Structure formats: structure tokens, C-alpha cells
Image: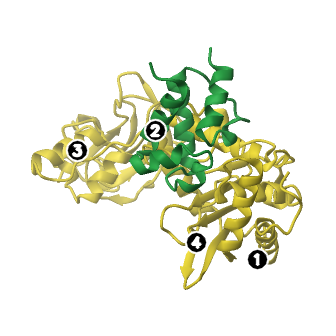
Amino acid sequence: MKNTADRVIGVIANALQLDEAEIVILKDTSGYKKLRKWTSARHAEIMVALEDEFGLTIDETSIPRLVDVSRIVDYIDANAR
Amino acid sequence: MAESTTTRVEVPRLNTNDDSAFLIEWVASAGQKVKQGDVLCVIETSKATVEIESPASGFLLSPVPAQREVKVGELLAVVSASLQPGGSDAMEPEAVSAPQATGFTQKALALVNRHNLDKTVFRHLALVREADVAEYLRTLDEKSAQVTPLNPVQLRAARVLTRSKQTVPHSYLSRFLPADAIDELVSGIAGKEGAMVSVSDWLAWSVARELRNRPKARATWSEQGLVIHPDVSLCVAINQSDGTVVAPVIRNADSLDVVAFSGAIRKLQMKSLRGRLEPEDLSGGNCTVTSLIGSGVHQVIPIIYPGQSIIFGIADAWRIGENGYYTLTASFDHRVLNGAEAGEILGSVAERMLGKHEEHG
């Protein structure tokens, strides 16, 4: 059974079509700055994919700050039903 | 050519629901010499506006008054071989049986003209729709280009853009902004806030703040006077997955800090991805920002949304040697603003983007 972090990584890797090397970068908390594929338009796609994966609605004010795996995991753990 | 000397022009049945139509206007006038196929008048049903073509060549006589309801089958006019019907020949006007005047929808007519078709091939139809013409084209040549119908959103977008370009006197100003300085500034804000803020977000936010002090940039032109909108409702252009561009609105855009503003844009992008943008998301804006950053294009010269007076566009930085520049362009309605005023606004937006104004909070 996958934990939240693995599921989040899976969602983002899929949304951004990341290769193995990029997934390594993703796992680093400031990875989003180094991932050129993670643009603001793709961020919207990631948010939609996370909402679908975890069955929640992400509130607008949190969206811009959900930029690394650990923050997303914290948000999901705090908000998932 | 029609053999009969006097031909009735009657209101055709254009669809099963309407027993009447509205005669909008005559294109040909009483006594005018017309050829078979010339447009005589324009009538409107609940579903379409149709041009009625002359069933014969001759002189148009006795056109009934326009701007009123007419019934299907009602006589609109006659086309007579001579200017005095019944004068030079023995036939009674009513004794002649005439081919029903063929109506073409505007789309059908456009297709016919585009392919230079002989309209008489559709004589057998009372109303020719685009699908009828498309079907005919297919029978001519199986390999000919197919007509791809447009969906209502694409049609509406096409009308909006056309109306803007036809009615608004556009004028354009640009400024080149040092890309490294802006990229560093935006990165710095994003880093400090621990948030995702893009250069496009930064432009839109800067415009929102600037609009607070620029009533004419939030105005709608009308001949009765400028309508100045009190609030700052900023439209942000979004490319949708079906290729259409929409520009949903952020209301009171000047009251948000830059991170909240970015969140609002992301939320609208998410709604677009889910196909859930509502009509209220798409109306009520008084200025627009569009970005082609990421497209590989160095300059965009945007089209003003009808009802607005100015639109700002930015594209990818153009790099030459060590230096890069973003081209920021404003397209503005020259009835509302003159070049100096628009230039001032553009300059002020540029200064905000370069961090020379208040804090981004």
C-alpha cells in the first residue's frame, strides 16, 4: 500500500512526464525551482490531478504554496476526508 | 433563364416551426432590373437570417413594405419581364406558376461563394443550409476539403474578435524590459513567499495595481460617453485544451497580494481544465492581460476585448548575447486614450514589474 508521499510523487511525475533523474530532483524540497517542466500552467494541472487522486478540493489560497512534495503531503494529511 | 414573364416572389417556408418571418429590408428596389439569383431582400426567422434571391430576371415590382411580419407563402413582390406587368403581353400575373424563391443561409452562401458554385444546382430546395452545400461538394469530389463545423464557443470567439477589429481603432505601444532583472525579482518574491509566482502572474498583478489609478484604462467607449468602471476586474487569457482562448475574470484584482493573485489565476486555470468555467467567470472584466511566455514568440500584439479599452501582452524574452528583454505591449482603444496616456500607463506597469513601486504585499 503506497503512502501519501509516493502517491503524490506518482501524480506529479505523471502530470509532468518526469524521467527518473527528474523524479530524484522532485523528491528534494526545493526541487520545483529546478524542474523546468513545473511551470505555472502545469501547476494547475498538478493541482487538478491531486484533487482527483485524493478526492479533495484544494483551497485557492493554498494552491501557490503547494510547490514541493512534503508541503503537499502535509496539506493532504490535514485535509483528506 | 425563366420563361414566364411575371414571376411571384413569395415568402418560403424556411423551417417547420415558423409560419411567418420578419421582412428586414429590401436589397433591390422597386423598378430595379434584377438577374435571376440576385439578392432581393433579407428575411429573418426564429432560427436564421436568410437572403431571398430572385427566381427570374426582369424588373422588381410592387415590393411590400419592410420591417414587418410576413406569412409563409405571402407575396413579397413580382419580377416582371417588362416595367408594366400585363402591358406588353397577354398573360395574367397570377396565372404564371413560379419556382419557389430559394433561400440560402448566410453560412451556405459563404460556402457557395468560396467554391464558386452555380447556385441553380440548389433550385429544388426552398432553403439551402450549409450541410446541403457541403453534401454537394462531397459529391463533386470525394477528396475535396471537408467542412469542419465550429462549436458555439469557437463561433462566439470568432465574432468577438471580428467585432473588436472592425469597430475599435487599435493603436500599439511596446516597452522592452530587462529579462534578468525581472526573472530575479520574481524568483526572489517566489522564494521569499515559498510560492509559485510566474512572470506572467507578475505582469497581471502589476497591471491590476496600476489600474487602481487609471480610470480610463477601466473604461468602455460609447458615443454617449466613457463608462468608467469603479472596480478593477482583470481578465487573464488562458489557452484551453481545445485550442480556444478564454479570458476569465478576477474581480477586485487590485485588492489581492501577489500570492493570492497567483492562486486566483491557478484556480481559473483549474476550472478551465475541468471544463467548469461559468458565464459569470467570463463576463464583467474591464481590462485584459495575455501572456505568450513559453511559446517561443518574442512579441504579441493583442486584440482588445470589446467593451474594454486596453489589453497588455508579454511574450518570451528575446536574448541577444548576454542580454535578454521581455517585450511588453499594450494595445489600446485610441478613442479612449491617446498615445501619451497609454505610454504613461505602460511605463508605470513596466516600473512596477521592475520593482520600483510599492511592496508586492
Q: Are marks 1 and 3 on the same chain?
A: yes
Task: Report x, y in % for residue B288.
Answer: 68, 54
- Numbered badge on residue B152: 2
Q: Nearer the viewer, residue B52 or B317?
A: B317
Closer to viewer: mark 2 or mark 3: 2
Mark 3, other Cα within 10 Å: few <14 / some 14–19 / many ≥20: some
Query: Which residue appears farthest toward the top when viewing the image?
Result: A81
Which colour represents chain A?
A: green
- Numbered badge on residue B317: 4
Residue plotted at (20% across, 53% down): B145
Which secondary structure lies at badge 2? helix
As measured in the structure, the alpha-carbon distance from the residue carrying label 4 to the one carrying label 1 is 25 Å
Closer to viewer: mark 4 or mark 2: 4
In the picture of the structure, the residue carrying the numbered disc 3 is B134
Viewer can see residue B122: yes
Mark 1, other Cα within 10 Å: few <14 / some 14–19 / many ≥20: some
In the picture of the structure, the residue carrying the numbered disc 1 is B339
Closer to viewer: mark 1 or mark 3: 1
Q: Amino acid at mark 2?
A: Pro
Q: Amino acid at mark 4?
A: Ala
Which secondary structure lies at badge 4? loop
Q: Nearer the viewer, residue B168 or B277?
A: B277
Closer to viewer: mark 4 or mark 1: 4
Q: Is residue B83 left or right of residue B346?
A: left
As measured in the structure, the alpha-carbon distance from the residue carrying label 4 to the one carrying label 2 is 35 Å
Total labels drawn:
4
